[in-house]
Image (spheres, rainbow, N blue to C red):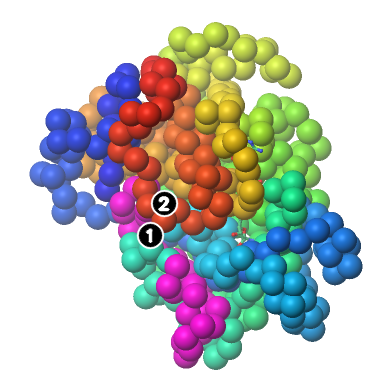
Amino acid sequence: MKFPGQRKIKHYFPVNAGNRFDRESVAFSHVNTYVTGIDQNLVDITARVDDELLAEFELQKGASQLMDSEKANLLYQRLQLNDAIEDEFAGGTIGNTLHNYSIIADDSSILLGVMSENIVIGTSAYRYLCNTSSKVDLTHLQPVPGAIGRCFALITSDGERTFGISPGQMNALSEDYISEAVIADASALLLCAYTLADESLPIYGATLKAAELAVKHDVPVILTLGTRPLVEAKRETFARFIRDYVTLVAMNEEEAEALTGHADPLLASEIVLDMADLVLLTAGPEGLYLSGYGDRSLLRKTANPIRSGAIADFNAYEFSRPIRRRDCSEPVKVYAQIDPYMGGPDKIHNTNGAGDGALAAVVHDMTANHYHRTVLPTSSKHVKPFLTYSSFAQVCKYANRVSYQVLIQNSPRLTRGLPEREDCLEEAYWDS
Ligand SMILES: Nc1ncnc2c1ncn2[C@@H]1O[C@H](COP(=O)(O)OP(=O)(O)OP(=O)(O)O)[C@@H](O)[C@H]1O
Ligand SMILES: Nc1nc2c(ncn2[C@@H]2O[C@H](CO)[C@@H](O)[C@H]2O)c(=O)[nH]1
């Protein structure tokens, strides 16, 4: 595994031989880590469209919504006719996050979901397999006799993405394909709200079983919220699920508002912290927020200017490391925020997957902590069972950096890891 390197050096991710941890990880390289997750496996069919086409196909802008196959076929034909299709590429919010995790961490992940049992060249299933990192283990997938899902990712001129989902057999995942051993040994279990949308579907039962096993084995459960209309429709169900199972909730500000009733990201995060231990809230051009708990005796004051919003002095302890509320003697809510990396790319063509990228970075920092604790349990870094290796402030920087990489690539799945040295970039960005 690549490792979030030493603090207080100019590059956040200095993977070099002089790094003390690298020497240790060579000595302990037999320790294998991975993260796992459940997804509705689907391909993204990315196309440029105008608002009129969204209206014609009754698609709510910015949201993800189901389409019946007749409408999906009509849309596909129209996009082909207009020569509007840019790409057909593996997608799925958890599939993207696992892929990006494996790319940036150089570590394994295990994807749980369905896959067509007969792979024909050119089909969605074929494209999915071609566009997934070889570090993502696909051997636990459930074979199905039909197609996986298709996600029309329709990009309008403002860079906003709207999803129309043609499900195929993506929801057929049975709980028989959720192995206790796979969940028990994982560093984290990644789930999305989409698979909890309909209790009558097999994938709902599979998701619940995985969450129960994760809690049984003390594996952190990470839930990403998907899309605003779904959260609005299932607000109570999701709140209960989060309380019962979830360690980290990831969402954008619209989903946060749907869950909590608060448009302000700090206030929304504060509410979600009463249900979970850690909250990643992405806010597009306003950057992102990471909120969680610190133990009063272990709080570290920020060296950055103190900032106030809806919560006064909210970043005062952003140099602390997140810990579960139940592991604190005296829990204190801690907040950190960061503006887009380098102000964001000059031109954004497509924001699809920027949030998934940020989450992959947070997962990497959590897994690095798990790895380090497994290898060096007596290290002073583990006097308490912290959730991440780095502080709130550092994790924000990393998450932001990965989102930027997704944006400049115009694609949710990273083709390569971050540069190990960023000599051309503003060094001050990485200080502290
Ligand atoms: N317009 C923008 N300008 C600058 N940075 C942006 C912009 N949009 C997104 N970002 C960066 O990407 C991160 C995540 O973006 P956003 O909040 O749009 O995610 P999201 O809606 O969850 O995306 P998705 O669901 O497609 O993965 C932001 O925190 C920010 O760093
Ligand atoms: N699993 C799942 N992923 C989705 C859905 N709608 C959009 N996405 C994915 O979300 C990603 C961006 O976060 C895209 O790459 C889409 O593939 C959905 O209904 N289910």
Q: Position of residue 110 (x, y in %)?
A: 39, 64
Residue at (17% x, 42% y) in the render: 25
Magenta stretch holds residue 113: yes
The disc labelled 2 sits on which kind of residue? Answer: Tyr
Residue at (57% x, 37% y) in the render: 345
Q: Position of residue 134 (x, y in %)?
A: 34, 66
Of the four image quadrants, the one with ligand 2 is: bottom right
The label on residue 101 is 2
The disc labelled 1 sits on which kind of residue? Answer: Ser
**Mark 1 = which residue?**
109
Using residue 345 as the reference point, say whether residue 274 is left or right of it: right
Q: Nearer the viewer, mark 2 or mark 1?
A: 2
Residue at (37% x, 29% y) in the render: 424
Stretch of the chain drawn in magenta:
102-131
Using residue 180 as the reference point, say whether residue 176 is left or right of it: right
Q: Earlier in the sequence, mark 2 or mark 1?
A: 2
Query: From the image, which quarter does the C terminus lie in?
Result: top left
